[in-house]
Amino acid sequence: MGTLVLILDLIGTFVFALSGATMGVRRRLDIFGVLVLSFAAALAGGITRDLLIGATPVAAISDWRYPAITLAAGIVTFFWAPLIERMQYPVRMFDAMGLALFAVAGTQKALAYGIDPPMAAALGMLTGIGGGIARDVLLAQVPLVLQAELYAVAALAGAAVVAVGYWLGLPPLPCALVGAGLCFGLRMMAMHFGWHLPVALQSSEPPPPEGPRK
């Protein structure tokens, strides 16, 4: 399971780094800004997960492969952004791939550290959404997880498959593939069909006037 978690974590790191770097290029940041967004989008979720389960020093700092992958993804995106932009909805597609892989890998790592399956699934979801939150906050915009179609729900669904499979004693690899596929499929279908959670109804009444300033 340790090898599987590492492979999924590294692949997820790369695609989330591409997502963050692509957003940086779109905002016309310099190369340092693009690399910062690449690092934050790829590693914020994993850092949070490792701190919560006690896996310290965190992998993003102790393993050179993680920052190296984010650096490579950022440089590739900075110099070949037009090629990446030719893909349909590149940022959201990379984001959906990273979400699926991180949700699965985060759940499996939490299980490996003895966390109960329900909380392991929650940590898997946190691993998946943490990088996107950090990226959006750095860009001064409302995080995608708070407004997008089935973002955190998709991550939780994929993570739950892994947790239930572990609880039932099923092989980890098929559970990881099914969980990642479910998360990615839900996210892409939600974007295509506009599925989203209910939002609060806004009042049609005008806001009350402000009182006199003291």
Image (cartoon, helix red, strand yellow):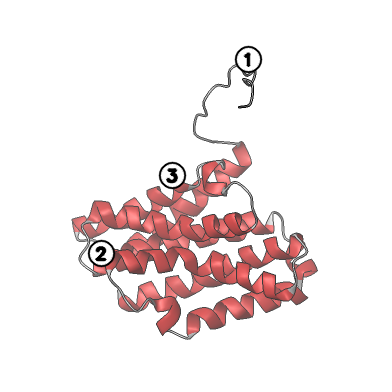
Rendering quarter of residue 127 = bottom left
Quarter of the image where the N terminus is located: bottom left
The mark that comes first in sequence, 1 or 3, is 3
| Residue 213 spot, x, y in % from top left | 63, 26
Q: Amino acid at mark 2?
A: Leu
Element class at badge 1: loop
Q: Residue shown at 48%/75% (left/top)? A: 10
Q: Which residue is mark 1?
A: 204
Rendering quarter of residue 49 = bottom left
Q: Which residue is mark 2?
A: 111
Position of residue 99 in the picture relative to residue 59 (left or right): right
Q: Which residue is mark 3?
A: 153
The mark that comes first in sequence, 2 or 1, is 2
The mark that comes first in sequence, 3 or 2, is 2
Q: Amino acid at mark 1?
A: Ser
CA distance separating discs 3 and 2: 20 Å
CA distance separating discs 2 and 1: 48 Å
Q: Residue shown at 34%/68% (left/top)? A: 51
